[in-house]
Image (cartoon, rainbow, N blue to C red):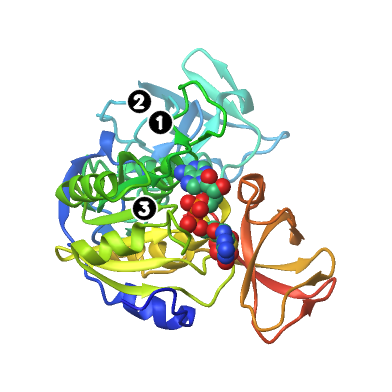
Amino acid sequence: MAFLKVIPLEEALKVVLSFELPVKVEEVDLANALGRIVAEDVYSPTDVPPFDRATVDGYAVRAEDTFMASEASPVKLKVVGEVHAGEVPSIELGKGETVYISTGAMLPKNADAVIQFEDVERVNDEIIIQKPAYPGLGVMKKGADIEKGKLLIKKGTKLTFKETALLSAVGIHKVRVFKRPRVAVISTGNEVVLPGQELKPGQIYDINGRAITDAVNELGGEGIFIGIAQDNRDSLKELIERAIEVGDLIILSGGASGGMRDLTASVIEELGEVKVHGIAIQPGKPTIIGIVKGKPIFGLPGYPTSCLTNFTLLIAPLLLKSLGREGKVKKVKAKLKHKVFSVKGRRQFLPVKLEGNIAVPILKGSGAVTSFIDADGFIEIPENVESLDEGEEVEVILFSF
Ligand SMILES: Nc1nc2c(c(=O)[nH]1)N[C@H]1C(S)=C(S)[C@@H](COP(=O)(O)OP(=O)(O)OC[C@H]3O[C@@H](n4cnc5c(N)ncnc54)[C@H](O)[C@@H]3O)O[C@H]1N2
Ligand code: MOO
């Protein structure tokens, strides 16, 4: 193991993307499909609507019967029946005939328009029309909304309520999705305690455990929080071994650097292999990438902003790839609100808040948790660049999956 021998981000990413996570597919009920990633393209098995349908309450007519209608010379049609939603009309419209029809009902044969009842005068079993109807008025044609055979959802799409609505519309009640990769999450540090516990002097609440677990969940994986390891080899080993049992991938945070109590790298080396310790980026220099019992294991920096930035840069692409999502994190273009400075020779990732298409830099530093909580994403400042100017176009890597 080369202790803190920094390598470029691209090299580190190559190591990460060489890991193969198990890719499995399962079928789930639509009711449990929200947030899951679709494993194959989904095509519509049916037309929506499945029949020509009235879009208003009124009278179904043959439009040609009304072409001559005017205020001076109204047309009269005979009402020969009624058809309501859910019924199959038994009537075929003859010349000069109409039926009362409810919104959502199937058009009777030969009808090609529906005139809303407000626009006709009903006198006993006749309606009086003063304005011509055109074919298609008040009608949604079969398949006009969604055509049978249309590609509805592409493989790799994360299901939101819109997609589950779309699947409902075509009657699909089971969907094939990628199994969620199981990601075991460990926080480390004697000072770190779980929210809900009393905070003693010198202690802080665990942020990374929740944040990483939920970032994994948001991305489509299954985050499993294992616990908080103390800063000693036995505690770290015990939690890593538990994590290996349940996870396809393991993420630790804290203790990644080279301080006296930073043990993560050497414990990983004892249990398996450290492949990378040190990446030429800021934040994230002390990041660890390794493998234990065939499972990828990551040690992220303890500072929550550094931790989540590096999760997004390094681990999200691997999880996205294993979920058929092409390994790409979301990016948007924006203009920088004001000039920012960086240190030459350091490749920096700076949190920014988006106000429309303006990226507002957050300059509190990676030691502040609000640096990433207030941020929508972060921008890159390459190592050979000392500053970016006000109004310069930047690419924002989003903290959302
Ligand atoms: N001599 C040097 N010291 C430090 C350097 C350096 O280059 N030379 N780099 C600093 C930077 S940058 C970072 S990042 C940290 C990373 O070190 P570690 O990964 O070993 O992180 P820790 O020391 O364990 O923790 C750093 C900080 O974050 C807090 N923390 C840790 N875990 C959590 C958690 N789960 N939730 C909330 N906060 C957490 C921890 O209490 C520390 O305050 O090293 C710097 N030092
Ligand atoms: O690496 Mo620290 O992660 O620079 O903030």
The residue nearer to you, when weighing 261 against 389, is: 261
Q: Distance between the residues labelled 3 and 2?
A: 58 Å
In the rendered structure, find residue 85 and report the number of the disc placed on it: 2
Amino acid at dot 1: Gly
Quadrant (top left/top right/bottom left/bottom right) for the N terminus? bottom left
Amino acid at dot 2: Ala
How packed mark 2 is, by other alpha carbons closer than 10 Å (few <14, some 14-19, many 20 or more), is some
Is 365 on the left or on the right of 16, as rendered? right
Q: In this view, does 395 lie above or below 99?
A: below
Number of marks present in the image shown:
3
Q: Is mark 3 on a helix, strand or loop?
A: strand
In the rendered structure, find residue 88 and report the number of the disc placed on it: none
Residue denoted by label 3: 252
Q: Is residue 363 above or below residue 51?
A: below
Looking at the image, which residue is at 45% across and 28% down? 103
> Which quarter of the rendered image does ligand 2 occupy?
bottom right
